[in-house]
Amino acid sequence: MDIANKIQAELSQSAQPKKVLDSYDPTYDPLVAATPGRGQQYAPTYWVATAGTAPEDDGPITQDVDVDVAIIGSGFTGLTCALFLAKEHGIKATVLEANQVSWGCTSRNGGQAQNASGRLTRSQWIQRWGIDTARKMHEEVQEGFATFKGLIKEGNIDCNPQDGGHLYVAHREKALRKLEAEGKVLRDQFGYQTEMLDKATLSRNYVDEAEAVGAMHEPDGIGVHPLKLAHGYQRMARELGATIHPSSPVTGWETKNGIHYLQTPGGIVRARAVAVATGGYTSQGLHHQLRNKIMPILSNSLVTRPMTDQELAACNFKTNEVITDTRTLRHYYRKLPDNRLQIGSRSSITGSDAANPKHLQLLVEGMHRKFPALTGINVDYSWWGWVDVSHDMMPRIAQPDEKEQVFYALGYGGNGVMFSAHAGRRMAQRVAGIKEGFELPIYDTALPGHLFSPFRRLGQRMLYNWYQLRDEHL
């Protein structure tokens, strides 16, 4: 089956009715649609197909209700915020989800937990904030990794963790020199023991990737099954008293006398505080504090059939670690526990063009360049999803206006699998009224806007062309 027909077959299969769910809409675009929909099926991802039976939820909102805290969005951030509100502050939150629980970023990412938050490097942190703040940020991210691993252990979450670290693969000599400089900064300024690998060592001990000229190895990095992880968070949150309501999109939001009136199709949720955890699926009209604050970016992902012993040997695929390359439009990839290859990268600019087979073809060609022995291997799953990128490339876990009990945790830029757990914890602290401990830039400032936000898609097209030229030719 060729790629175009395979996409259509998968989308058709995903659109078959289950219970009373609406069909999955592959063209959804957060800059166009008023909401992400209502009660839609999941995207046809490998994670959805292999996650097993989902935990129970609390069903859609069916009447007007009064709650202390409403959380909009049931991905990693929303679920962990609800979990920590109950566990550490005795607050039982109400989670509102437009479609199925963990329907958005959480069930569509690559499952890579890395020692990162946002898209900036440690060197860029130093340039932006100075060395003292950068070191505090590094400590915060390290604490975030401990939060993430602690939840998996505490909840006994069987999310197929693959530990061992992160390989940052240089796809060109110039990129390798930059990696060497960044590795030195990490070791000298942060005490973080990275290791540089030449091509021979990488190929012999980890994986023989045809494009690689070397790599930086980081000690922290874990691959997970993201939807199984979310199921674990969901069980933990509900056991602690949180309620989780799918098929309950927020279609209107008014604030009167300090009370937030959240309109859903089944009734109005009146909340004293609202925490927003909608990621790349944040609608422009959700709240005035969020308009034009996130640049949603599409990412494509695929999973192959299981690799044969001969294919694994040809690629010398010894490592189970998470891997990214040094392209600006980077590839992220790894060998899954069942010996399939998962790989992802850039996709369409608009939702209306997302199903165009050319975007999957670009990803397939990238896989073939990296692993020639896999040329022609069947693609069993392919999907795409929206990534929340802030205009300054760093997340915010903030209360944008002290006069309003509105909070958000957004802008991970593709590095939310790990840090979202800590962001959920930090947002829970803010909702609970804790004032101290939020001196870092990602906590004490709001998401920035951008002067040219109405023209962002035009700029994105120009940037993609420039990145492609710079990554591959200049």
Image (tube, grey):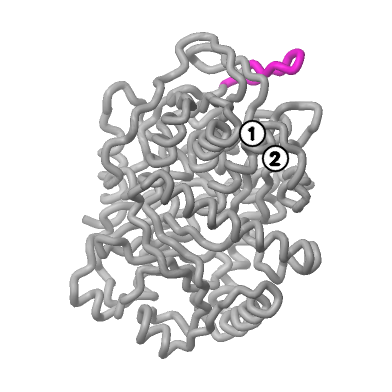
> Residue 395 appears at what percent x and percent y?
66, 50
Residue 39 location, quadrant: top left
Which labelled disc corresponds to residue 124?
none
What residue is shown at x 43% (from left), y 24% (from top)?
247
Q: Is residue 253 found inside the magenta-colored segment of the image? A: yes
Q: Nearer the viewer, residue 173 or 470?
A: 173
Give the residue pinned by disc 2.
Answer: 292
Q: Give 160 or 149, whichever is nearer the viewer.
A: 149
To which quarter of the image does residue 175 belong?
bottom right
| SS class, disc 2 | loop
Range of magenta residues: 251-261
- Dots 1, 2 in contact, CB < 8 A: yes
- Which of marks 2 and 1 precedes in the sequence? 1
Residue 226 image point, x, y percent? 40, 49
Q: Quadrant of the N terminus?
A: bottom left
Residue ID at (53%, 24%): 94
Q: Amino acid at mark 2?
A: Asn
147 or 302: nearer the eye?
Answer: 147
Q: Is residue 391 above or below residue 222?
A: above
Which quadrant of the figure contains the C terminus?
A: bottom right
Residue 422 makes an appearance in the image = yes
Q: Which image quadrant for residue 27?
A: top left
How packed mark 2 is, by other alpha carbons closer than 10 Å (few <14, some 14-19, many 20 or more), is many
Report the residue that reaches farthest toward the left: 309
Estimate the spatial distance between the alpha carbons at disc 1 and disc 2, rounded to whole Å.
Answer: 7 Å
Disc 1 marks which amino acid?
A: Gln
What x and y, as percent, mark residue 165?
Answer: 46, 69
- Asked if 128 appears above or below 194 in the picture, the reply is above
Where is residue 411 drawn, in percent x and y? Answer: 63, 48
- Residue sitting at 79 percent across and 33 percent down? 401
Give the residue pinned by disc 1. 284
Reply yes or no: does residue 318 show up in magenta: no
